[in-house]
Image (cartoon, rainbow, N blue to C red):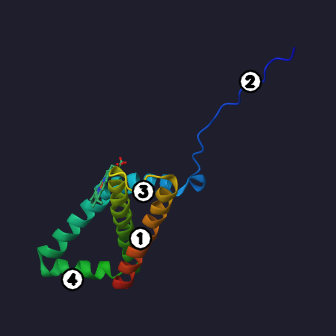
Amino acid sequence: MKPAIPQRPKYYDLNLANLPAPGLVSIFHRISGALLFVPVIPALLFLMQATLGSEAGYLQWRGVLAMPAVKLILLGFTWLYAHHFFAGIRYLLLDLHWGIGKEPARASAKLVFVLGAFATLLVAWRVW
Ligand code: HEM
């Protein structure tokens, strides 16, 4: 008698490209939450102090913030906040049992990405 073929080990597929939208929203929500805590909040507090402390400081930082590379970093911060915000609203709605079916949950996850991108583009349009 042939020996039974052993079951192949199962691995989690950690490739982000294969995750459905809700999985991506979840991972980016966690990453954005951590990055908002550090470095975004400390950087914004520092900027607030530097620009409100003196006129010279304001003018110096105005020059820095006009640089395209710095604007891109700030847009990155904006996306982190926008994604965290819209994903957060989605989680609060899910907590209320709104849209918990598979299809609505996938649709709302895609909407989170669209709204995050739209908010970031809106800010990009304002700062450029
Ligand atoms: C700068 C402000 C914020 C910071 C630093 C922050 C940070 C975080 C962090 C670190 C987590 C834990 C993520 C995890 O372990 O999965 C979290 C979760 C959460 N945040 Fe924020 N957050 C901020 C603003 C907001 C806002 C404005 C909302 C409202 C929409 C929000 C809604 C949520 C919700 C609902 C969760 C729990 C998600 C879950 O059930 O897994 N957050 N936040």
Mark-to-mark CA distance, 2 and 1: 47 Å
**Pointer 4: what residue?**
59
Disc 2 marks which amino acid?
A: Pro
Inter-mark Cα distance, 3 to 2:
41 Å
Identify the mark nearer the N-term, 2 or 1: 2
Image: 29 above or below 14: below
Quarter of the image that includes the N terminus: top right
Q: Secondary structure at mark 3?
A: loop
Task: Give, as a three-letter code, the residue at label 1.
Answer: Leu
Within-10-Å neighbours for mark 2: few <14, some 14–19, many 20+: few
Q: Which residue is mark 1?
A: 115
Pointer 2 residue:
6
Q: Secondary structure at mark 2?
A: loop
Residue 79: horizontal and vertical position, in percent?
39, 68
Q: Residue furthest left?
A: 54
Query: Quadrant of the rendered structure where residue 64 is?
Result: bottom left
